[in-house]
Image (tube, rainbow, N blue to C red):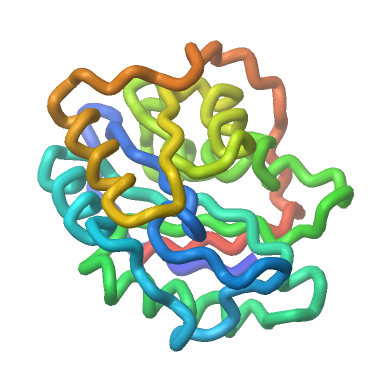
Amino acid sequence: MLKRVPARSIHLAMNKAVFLNRDGTLNRLAPQADHIRSPEQVELLRGAAHAVGMLRRAGYLCVIVSNQRGVALGLMTEGELEAVDVRLRELLGGIDASYYCTHSIGEGCDCRKPEPGLLLRAAAELDIDLGDSWMIGDSVTDLDAGVAAGCRTLRVQPVDFSLLDAAHSIIAGNAQPAWTAEPSCTSVLSPVKKIISIVP
């Protein structure tokens, strides 16, 4: 597991967060059956950087939670995944943390969405109140992970300005969750699970 964790001040209150899927939510999808493998392939969806900036100014931590099985398939290295993350952060103008599951389908991990492990790990490390947080993604698996973690959820389309519309709705207080979150997850996080977490 790769991790960069800064010295953090003690929080008097827990943080609220917006968990964001990566591909199709923040940046354009790779061609079918392909993966975003290099910084040069990263192209933000229009409105994504504005949306992240708005949410952070409104007091939300913005945390990327993304399945990236291309590492397990040998299509990219962990270093290449980190390089893509660095480029994405630059284009967005900043992000609070990134958590990536690098397992393949069927490995039985607790971090590959729709399992909630990425969100639970982030919540534990960043003092996040899951009940006061949102999961936004373009896939049903994103929403299922959010519900299992106890978050409210919003589904966006992998098109320009969809995330910006979602951010406006959350900040205005009129967002309608896609599913009612029931914090009934019983997953146990294991330190041997291979999560790449990048906390600047």
Residue at 73 percent of width and 44 percent of height: 190
Residue 90 occupies which quadrant of the picture?
Answer: bottom left
Q: Image check: 1 left or right of 94? A: right
Q: How many marks?
A: 0
Instruction: Find residue 18 and report its horizontal and vertical position in percent.
Output: 34, 39
Q: Image check: 28 left or right of 109? A: left
Residue 147 occupies which quadrant of the picture?
Answer: top right
Q: Is residue 26 above or below residue 18?
A: below
Q: Is residue 114 above or below residue 92?
A: above
Residue at 57 percent of width and 70 percent of height: 30
Instruction: Find residue 32 and report its horizontal and vertical position in percent.
Output: 67, 67
Nearer-the-camera pick, 83 or 169 = 169
Quarter of the C terminus within the rendering: bottom left
Residue 14 occupies which quadrant of the picture?
Answer: top left
Residue at 37 percent of width and 34 percent of height: 128
Nearer-the-camera pick, 136 or 151 = 136
Q: Image check: 107 left or right of 182? A: right
Instruction: Find residue 74 and report its horizontal and vertical position in percent.
Output: 79, 79
Quarter of the N terminus within the rendering: bottom right
Q: Is residue 87 above or below residue 186?
A: below
Residue at 80 percent of width and 58 percent of height: 104
Instruction: Find residue 11 and report its horizontal and vertical position in percent.
Output: 24, 37
